[in-house]
Amino acid sequence: MYTTEQKLLIAFSHLGGFTGFVVVAPLVIYLLSKDQAVKNNAKEAAAFQALVTIGGIAVGIISFIGRLLTPVLIGVPISIVGGLIGTVLAIAGIVLPIMATVKVLKGEEFSYPITGAFVRGIQ
């Protein structure tokens, strides 16, 4: 069970992407907090938000390449794949931090499906 202060810090680290401080908010909380539970959640939120950001950049590059290759018709499938991956990333980048915040405010543990196990293994 988390204390009220822990819940607020963890919630802000998960929702940092919505404030415009995508990876900065969880990293600041990670560096300034002395509580291990807050640090673990902030580390996991930072890793997930970094993954979504890097994925978004990669999708942008893929879509740009697909757009350049459209006259040769090979670019159409590349653009479609880029669009589908971008859509999945956007939905995950919105839904998962909200789910994490709701669970944390209820006092429950949350782990991101993609980065969670990897990040929890890092000391």
Image (cartoon, helix red, strand yellow):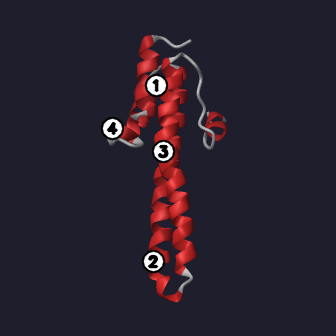
Residue 10's mark? 1
User: What residue would you read off at disc 4?
Assistant: 19
Contact flag, marks 3 and 4 (Cβ < 8 Å): no
Q: Nearer the viewer, mark 4 or mark 2?
A: 2
Mark 1 belongs to which amino acid?
A: Ile
The three-letter code of the residue at mark 4 reads Thr
Using the image, tell me which numbered label, if any, was put on residue 67.
2
Q: Position of residue 6 (x, y in %)?
A: 46, 17
The CA distance from mark 2 to mark 1 is 40 Å
Q: Nearer the viewer, mark 1 or mark 4?
A: 4
Specify the quadrant that holds the N terminus.
top right
Q: Is residue 9 visible?
A: yes
Would you say 28 lies left or right of 58 here? Answer: left
Per the image, the residue denoted by label 3 is 93
Residue 36: x percent and y percent? 54, 21
What's the residue at 52%, 88% (across, down)?
72
Relative placement, left or right, of 119 versus 22 is: right
Q: Are marks 2 and 3 in contact (CB under 8 Å)?
A: no
Q: Is residue 77 above or below residue 94?
A: below
Q: Residue at x 63, y 33 (%)?
A: 120
Residue 93, compared with residue 60, is above or below; it is above
Mark 3 is on which residue type? Gly
Circle 3 or circle 1, nearest the eye: 3
Residue depicted at 54% across the width and 69% down the height: 80
Label 2 environment density (alpha carbons within 10 Å; few <14, some 14–19, many ≥20): some
Residue placed most toward the observer, 55 or 121: 55
